Amino acid sequence: MSILHIVGLGPGDPDSIPLGSYEIMRRGWPVVLRTREHPAVKRLQEAGVTYQTCDDLYEKCDTFDAVYEAIVARLLHLAEGHPHVVYAVPGHPLVAERAVQILLAQPHPGVEVEVGPGQSFLDLAAARLGIDPVEGLLLLDGLALRHDQLNPRLHTFIAQVYDRAVASEVKLTLMELYPDEYEVVIVRAAGVRGEERMERVPLYEIDRLAWIDHLTTLYVPPAKDAAVLYRDLHEAPRIVEVLRGPNGCPWDRKQTHASLRKYVVEEAYEVAEAIDEGDADHLAEELGDLLLQILLHARIAEEAGEFTLRDVFAGLAAKLVRRHPHVFGDEVAKTADDVRGIWEQVKQDERRNEEREESALSGVKLAGPALAVAQAVQKAAAKVGFDWSNEADVWQKVKEEMNELDIERRREPRDAAKLAAEAGDVLFAVVNLCRFVDLDAEAVLAQATRRFVRRFRYVEERLRSNGGSWETASPEALDAYWNEAKIAFPQSN
């Protein structure tokens, strides 16, 4: 059994090499350095420590991943012929050392991996900047930085900003959250006497600094400006939580799932309208309004112990993966039709798993515009014979429901629930009549609404042109204007 000792050289200063690392490297065992490009290496040379490096692998390999794999292969091969091998890395063995993580991820027959001492650059960088990590700190890899890792409320260190090309990629990622002028700090060789350099610069300038090298780290301070915080994905849910809290907004606090239902529908329609307009800014605004409804419902549910916003995200993520086996699984889909077939099959499997009782209405989606849903339900019922036999009977049913509504509206005192039920029955019966005369109830009502809007605006214009107003115009004048509007915009318009 061979032992592969992994030790750290410390953050950079030759006097900061951990004593344990120093002693292990002086035992005469084979020593491998990840790179000789580290200030502490000259102390090893002074002490007569013999070593080899992996710098040649950076030249031979096309990617960093290939470099790390080659380092692991070299170390394991060396361990086959020696009972002890030392692998020394800059800083701490467990901070920003991908090859070490690969070694620790799986067992290697005949080789035991031991992680020894080290000191990360993070300690000195935090000390030099005067920050307390317990306030909240992110340590991220500049070579694999993603915008979804960022949190503007935390101290953020981005390591391995090796050169200006890496700095440019880091800058572009940060600019998805932070403004171009946001002040950041470039830290080079923190704590290394004679080599340390720190400079505060606007974010857009970080890739213009000629002295960036392998000892460079970027520090992004926590944001306090609302313009930055508002772009964080966690900020809007936090604001909704405040609005629903004890000292929040009275209107928001009293809302329920039921009271907000109409707003969800309304905002969805406004999103569709913005899409039709082709206005990107308007669409972004309307999507925000729709998202607010989602956040409010999730918050109300969390307060009731039903579910949380994370449950919503988890359910959505699981569904997306489940319904895209051609992306996340073994299915193959080369065309949109292939995808559609897979999607429908997965949905059928989901319905079978739900073990719902079969119904003639199972295929009807009850989510949607009320008139369209009513017409779809009636068509589904008609397919199994549950329908009126002729148009005259349907018309009679409309009149019957209108009479029941009239009776209910005259009742004193009024019963709001019964009045709503009778009004609903009238609408449902009229939808049935539309179906019998081959009309789309949803389209018919939409046309009638647009026609009313055109006529109403005509009346408004006539009032303005004659120097009148809604308050001063007589009923006779309004009737006259309305009749003009009906001529200007007939039923066919």
Image (cartoon, helix red, strand yellow):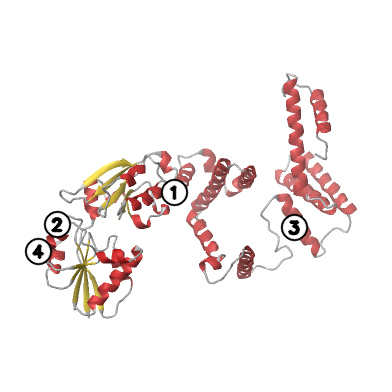
Front label number (1 vs 2)? 2
> Position of 398 compared to 21: left or right?
right
The residue carrying mark 4 is 47
Question: For mark 1, what is the residue?
Answer: 234
Estimate how packed mark 2 is, as few (under 14), some (14 to 19) or many (20 or more) residues with alpha carbons within 10 Å: some
Q: Which is more N-terminal, label 1 or label 4?
A: 4
Residue at position x 30%, y 48% from top? 219
Disc on the earlier residue, 2 or 4: 2
Q: Quick check: 133 above or below 80?
A: above
Instruction: Please indicate whether residue 382 sits to the left or right of residue 161 in the image.
Output: right
Q: Residues within 10 Å of mark 1 (few under 14, many from 20)?
A: few
The quadrant of the image that shows the N terminus is bottom left
Three-letter amino acid code of the residue under disc 2: Pro
Q: x and y percent of residue 483 in the render?
A: 83, 29
Q: Nearer the viewer, mark 3 or mark 1?
A: 1
Kind of residue indicated by mark 1: His
